[in-house]
Image: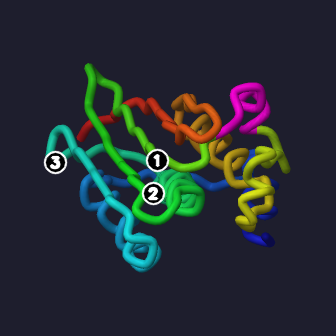
């Protein structure tokens, strides 16, 4: 919670110091998958991933990128039931990196999607799912994506999972 508040404060004040470095996106995604491997195994989840191209090296702020992908993976794993499916993908389209995180979990009620990225907001079905959360994760994700020069969108409906799509400039190396 404290880290979430600090991240929010730094992002809002513009004092989040960015550090641009080369990122091998496949390796980066694999390291995040490793962070959640215990929970993925415990819930018997089917993890799918597609990396197009296999090797994609670009320049980005790895801390911000980690905040984005880790939060989305955390939510996907948290809100999907046992034997559920989670996928993490990227694809280079023209000069845009399109990242998707998809799950077949509890989804988000359609009439709540427009509030999803606001501070302290949690979907009504997230409360009933008894999953812990501060309501700051997706707010921080959106702020981080925008700081990286990208945009984020979500497609979801209740009980039909969610797909978060991030579009980032490639800054290819």
Residue at image mark 2? 62
Report x, y in % for residue 70: 51, 60
Specify which label sits upstream in the sequence, 1 or 3: 3
Disc with the residue nearer the chain's start (3 vs 2)? 3
Which stretch did the figure color magenta?
108-117
Q: Mark 1 points at which residue?
A: 103
16 left or right of 165 in image: right
Mark 3, secondary structure of its residue: loop
* Residue underneath mark 3: 55
Q: Is residue 92 above or below residue 7?
A: above
Q: Nearer the viewer, residue 145 or 71?
A: 71
Mark 3 Cα shell of 10 Å, populated few (<14), some (14-19), many (≥20): few
Q: In this view, does 128 lie to the left or right of 16?
A: right
Residue positioned 75% across, 48% down in the render: 125
Residue 101 vertical placement versus 132 (above, below): above
Q: Position of residue 56 (x, y in %)?
A: 21, 44
């Amino acid at each position: 919670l404290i880290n979430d508040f600090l991240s929010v404060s730094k992002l809002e004040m513009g004092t989040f110091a960015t550090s641009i470095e080369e990122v091998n996106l496949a390796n980066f995604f694999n390291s995040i998958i490793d962070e959640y491997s215990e929970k993925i195994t415990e819930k018997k989840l089917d993890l799918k991933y597609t990396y197009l191209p296999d090797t994609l090296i670009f320049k980005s702020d790895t801390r911000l990128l980690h905040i984005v992908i880790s939060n989305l993976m955390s939510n996907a794993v948290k809100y999907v039931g046992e034997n559920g499916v989670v996928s993490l993908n990227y694809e280079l389209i023209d000069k845009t990196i399109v990242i998707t995180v998809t799950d077949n979990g509890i989804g988000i009620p359609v009439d709540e999607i427009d509030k999803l990225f606001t501070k302290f907001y949690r979907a009504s079905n997230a409360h009933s799912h008894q999953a812990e959360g501060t309501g700051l994760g997706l707010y921080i994700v959106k702020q981080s994506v925008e700081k990286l020069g990208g945009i984020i969108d979500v497609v979801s409906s209740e009980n039909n999972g969610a797909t978060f799509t991030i579009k980032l400039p490639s800054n290819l190396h």
